[in-house]
Image (cartoon, rainbow, N blue to C red):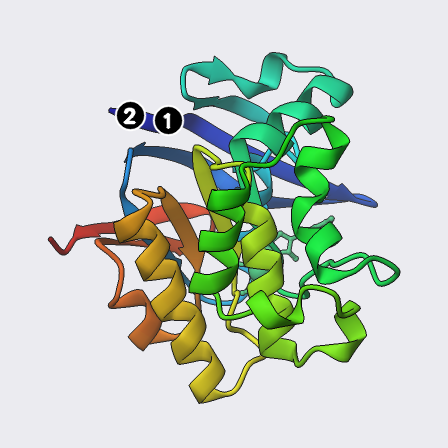
Amino acid sequence: MEILKCEDIRKVYCSGRHQVIALDGIDLSVEKGEFVAIVGASGSGKSTLLHILGSVDRPSQGRVLIEGTDISTLNRTEAAIFRRRKVGLVYQFYNLIPTLTIRKNILMPLLLDKRKPDFQFFDRIVTTLGIADRLEALPNQLSGGQQQRAAIARSLIYRPALLLADEPTGNLDRKNSREIMDLLKLSNRNLDQTMILITHDEKAALEADRIVTIEDGRIIRDEKRR
Ligand SMILES: Nc1ncnc2c1ncn2[C@@H]1O[C@H](COP(=O)(O)OP(=O)(O)OP(=O)(O)O)[C@@H](O)[C@H]1O
Ligand SMILES: [Mg+2]
């Protein structure tokens, strides 16, 4: 089943009299359960693409469909709700709310929707991610790796159709990076979580089912590995 489809995505930024073509005709289709790594040089358009897929940003041209919904037809509020329910976004710098406990941070997407959490699933996630004993702590009382795991837990709680992660191991040491990669793989395998991961780390990319290479806003290679 196709979960994500984007057609001829272009993104042009205008800064002063200059135009930057960040994305120049991206076509991509991702099946449910796929684990896709996006690689490419700095400035090639990876984050821009991820933000458009996650509906935090709009393309200048082209369509993005997630589970058949054309997200460009959504207004700002609808997009925020759609994103919360369908797309889990993991930013490089966690974005946890500093005044809330880890438990509340993770449950936040559900609380915003006044939805009852599935506590079994919650327990499974926090146990898998190894933060079950840190739930009453505040984010600044956790290590970087633990905060990143909490951010991943928050992105998984809604069982999103799509998990998007921008360099989730970008500022972690080797051991913590390894752990995060293992956990992402685990949730991909065990929870059948569809995942798109941006990474600079060649080793991390090799863990994926598929590696998409971007250069100057275009896909120059799309390699299925299994
Ligand atoms: N808000 C913006 N205004 C103008 N230009 C932008 C803006 N955001 C990104 N760009 C430009 O678009 C291009 C793609 O940027 P993007 O952030 O997507 O690259 P990236 O592949 O994620 O790079 P990195 O690996 O360094 O994170 C770059 O040339 C960048 O300078
Ligand atoms: Mg980037």
Q: Position of residue 67 (x, y in %)?
A: 41, 20
Tell me which corner region of the image, top left, top right, bottom left or bottom right, holds residue 13: top right
Observer-side mark, 1 or 2, equals: 2
Depth check, front residue: 171 or 222: 171
Position in image of residue 177 (x %, y %): 45, 78
* Circle 1: element type: strand
The picture quadrant for ligand 1 comes to bottom right
Residue 139 sits in quarter? bottom right
The residue furthest right is: 99
Give the CA distance from mark 1 to mark 2: 7 Å
At horizontal 62% and vertical 58% (from top left) the residue drawn is 151
Q: Are marks 1 and 2 in contact (CB under 8 Å)?
A: yes
Name the residue beneath numbered marker 2: 2
Q: Nearer the viewer, residue 211 or 218?
A: 211
Residue extending furthest toward the top: 73
- Which residue does the numbered mark 1 point to in the structure image? 5
